[in-house]
């Protein structure tokens, strides 16, 4: 009964209410409660019992009652009732990118569509294109969206899967006979999306006995022994877990295999065979012992993708990867002045407590009306609040930033003179994702000609498992950023993780600074940085590659260099 599960129930209720045509106020109440619970750092089941959850902003009496029932009984009578009134397949249609409630209602009413399969047939045979306000282009977009859903439907966002895996790890660690539990697989390798959870267990009991014990753990269903030393379990919400078990003395080899990836493990196995080493059955309690036996340095899990990391480990040329403690400043934060939930001072105090030396406030610019973009009057008040904080603060500095929209013609929101009021500017695209590659690339390149742009935010606009990147020539963008001294962000919002880690080495090698931006819209969102650091490590980045690993003077030196660039 975790936070994500409770939030998912509330999101489902909101979707069903919306499809029924209930009031926007009621739909928004359930959706706001879902977001609040997703961001809540405590245990939702305990907080629902103690009453703490009812004090959370966004959670009202009706939504609190739903959560209490769900955490107590494992189901929601409100959701069950809605499922009897609305075909469940209609909610599944809302998972198709770009397909909203209004269009789903039309499809259901006009074409009797009740499932994704129904919709795909109707889009292919021309019936969707003939509907009023649809047309051939909409039908094509729907088919692309269905294809995207087929490709990503069994995947999960990193932070959702991580939370579930941590709960499973804690439960297994408490079982008798278990001496060590490590989350392995794609989670340990910091992959941005996760197909299933992998867990490595050191235990003195047999896998069948562990399976019997796991069958009594809350939230774990259908536990089965699937092979020698391997179990599987259903964690619900389309997420499964593969659990690997070995005696403590052979845990190192088990953890290495369970972490993967396949190419890395196969290359390691080939290196072992070349030395006559049966590493799978040898007594290696730690991974480092196995690597040492092969004459290699231990390879950080994030790098284990079969991309030459073993050769570097043998040559002793693996880099010291960036760590969370290396970050001096936290940048890309949104406050209550736009679409965030915290004030400037609340964010500053949270950053101080987390050990940062500076924080960059970057609310949305006025063109982003959907996110409460800041007017000149609001900015004046915000800057006054920042000045007041900085006058009394000795160990943390708040920087006046802005996330300025890159408009379709490549110019920035606000006038150049107005942008000069800010300590630094992040330029981001938040609209007109539908431009062709040539136009979108030209738009970005023109924005980078403005010397006020210090950083390009979430450069491809992707939303993982929701929206494909817009069409843009990132090789050209990276070349231009290198030529002009513009930084390109790794946006650490778990929905984005953009710049893609696969593109980071090219940017680094070209000399492009790469900040890790939290894109925090709440205090809980500050923890996004941990996911962003994992992506930076996966890209092989070091402290010297990351812009906000510099102190505040070094960060502002980058900004000043841009401002004086032609």
Image (tube, helix red, strand yellow):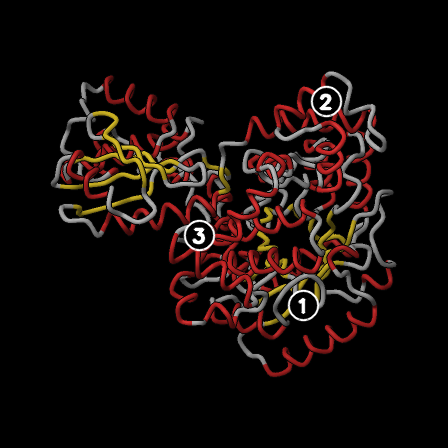
Q: Nearer the viewer, residue 94 or 70?
A: 70
Local packing at callout 2 (Cα closer than 10 Å; few below 14, some 14-19, many 20+) is many
Of residues 51 and 449, which is closer to you in this image?
A: 51
Q: In this picture, is 429 found above or below 434?
A: below
The residue mark sitting in front, 2 or 1, is: 2
Q: Secondary structure at mark 1?
A: loop
Front: mark 2 or 3: 2
Q: Earlier in the sequence, mark 2 or mark 1?
A: 2
Confirm or deny contact between disc 2 and disc 3 (CB under 8 A).
no
Residue 6 is left or right of residue 464, and the answer is left
Pointer 3 residue: 323
Q: Which residue is mark 1?
A: 336
**Mark 1 or mark 3, earlier in chain:** 3
Q: Answer whether labels 1 and 3 touch (C-beta < 8 Å).
A: no
Q: Residues within 10 Å of mark 1 (few under 14, many from 20)?
A: some
CA distance for labels 2 and 3 = 48 Å
User: Residue at position x 71%, y 68% from top?
Assistant: 337
Mark 2: secondary structure: helix
Residue 65 is situated, as x and y percent measured from the top left of the image, at 49, 63
Q: Position of residue 77 (x, y in %)?
A: 48, 52
Q: Which residue is the site of mark 2?
A: 123
Residue 269 in sight here: yes
| 361 with respect to 351 (left or right) | right
Mark 2 or 3, nearer chain start: 2
Q: CA distance from mark 2 to mark 1?
A: 42 Å
């Amino acid at each position: 009964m975790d936070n994500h599960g409770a939030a998912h129930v509330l999101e489902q209720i909101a979707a069903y209410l919306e499809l029924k045509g209930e009031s926007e106020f009621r739909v928004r109440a359930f959706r706001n409660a879902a977001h609040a619970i997703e961001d809540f750092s405590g245990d939702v089941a305990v907080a629902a019992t103690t009453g703490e959850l009812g004090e959370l902003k966004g959670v009202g009496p009706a939504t609190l009652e739903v959560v209490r029932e769900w955490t107590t009984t494992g189901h929601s009578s409100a959701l069950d009732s809605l499922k009897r009134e609305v075909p469940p397949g209609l909610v599944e249609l809302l998972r198709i990118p770009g397909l909203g409630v209004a269009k789903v209602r039309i499809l259901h009413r006009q074409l009797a569509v009740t499932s994704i399969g129904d919709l795909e047939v109707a889009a292919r045979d021309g019936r969707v294109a003939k509907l009023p306000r649809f047309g051939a282009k909409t039908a094509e977009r729907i088919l692309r969206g269905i294809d995207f859903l087929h490709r990503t439907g069994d995947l999960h966002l990193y932070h959702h899967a991580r939370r579930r895996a941590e709960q499973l790890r804690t439960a297994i660690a408490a079982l008798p006979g278990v001496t060590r539990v490590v989350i392995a697989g794609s989670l340990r390798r910091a992959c941005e999306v996760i197909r299933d959870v992998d867990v490595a267990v050191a235990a003195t009991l047999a896998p069948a006995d562990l399976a019997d014990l796991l069958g009594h753990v809350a939230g774990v269903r259908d536990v089965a022994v699937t092979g020698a030393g391997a179990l599987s379990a259903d964690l619900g919400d389309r997420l499964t877990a593969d659990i690997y078990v070995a005696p403590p003395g052979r845990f190192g080899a088990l953890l290495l295999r369970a972490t993967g990836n396949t190419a890395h493990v196969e290359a390691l196995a080939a290196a072992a065979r070349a030395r006559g080493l049966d590493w799978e059955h040898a007594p290696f309690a730690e991974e480092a012992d196995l690597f040492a036996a092969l004459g290699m340095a231990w390879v950080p899990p994030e790098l284990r993708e079969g991309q030459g990391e073993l050769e570097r480990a043998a040559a002793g040329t693996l880099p010291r990867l960036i760590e969370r403690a290396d970050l001096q400043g936290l940048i890309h934060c949104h406050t209550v002045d736009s679409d965030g939930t915290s004030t400037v001072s609340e964010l500053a105090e949270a950053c101080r407590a987390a050990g940062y030396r500076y924080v960059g406030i970057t609310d949305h610019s006025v063109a982003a009306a959907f996110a409460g973009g800041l007017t000149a009057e609001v900015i004046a008040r915000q800057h006054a609040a920042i000045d007041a904080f900085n006058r009394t603060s000795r160990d943390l500095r708040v920087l006046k930033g802005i996330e300025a929209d890159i408009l379709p013609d490549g110019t920035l929101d606000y006038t150049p003179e107005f942008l000069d009021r800010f300590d630094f500017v992040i330029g981001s695209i938040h609209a007109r994702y539908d431009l062709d590659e040539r136009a979108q690339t030209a738009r970005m390149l023109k924005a980078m000609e403005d010397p006020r742009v210090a950083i390009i935010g979430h450069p491809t606009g992707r939303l993982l498992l929701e929206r494909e990147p817009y069409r843009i020539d990132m090789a050209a963008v990276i070349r231009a950023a290198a030529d002009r001294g513009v930084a390109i962000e790794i946006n650490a919002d778990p929905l984005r993780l953009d710049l893609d880690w696969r593109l980071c080495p090219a940017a680094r090698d070209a000399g492009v600074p790469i900040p890790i931006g939290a894109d925090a819209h709440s205090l809980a969102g500050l923890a996004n940085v941990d996911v962003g650091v994992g992506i930076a490590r996966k890209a092989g980045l070091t402290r010297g590659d990351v812009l906000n690993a510099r102190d505040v003077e070094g960060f502002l030196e980058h900004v000043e260099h841009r401002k004086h660039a032609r």
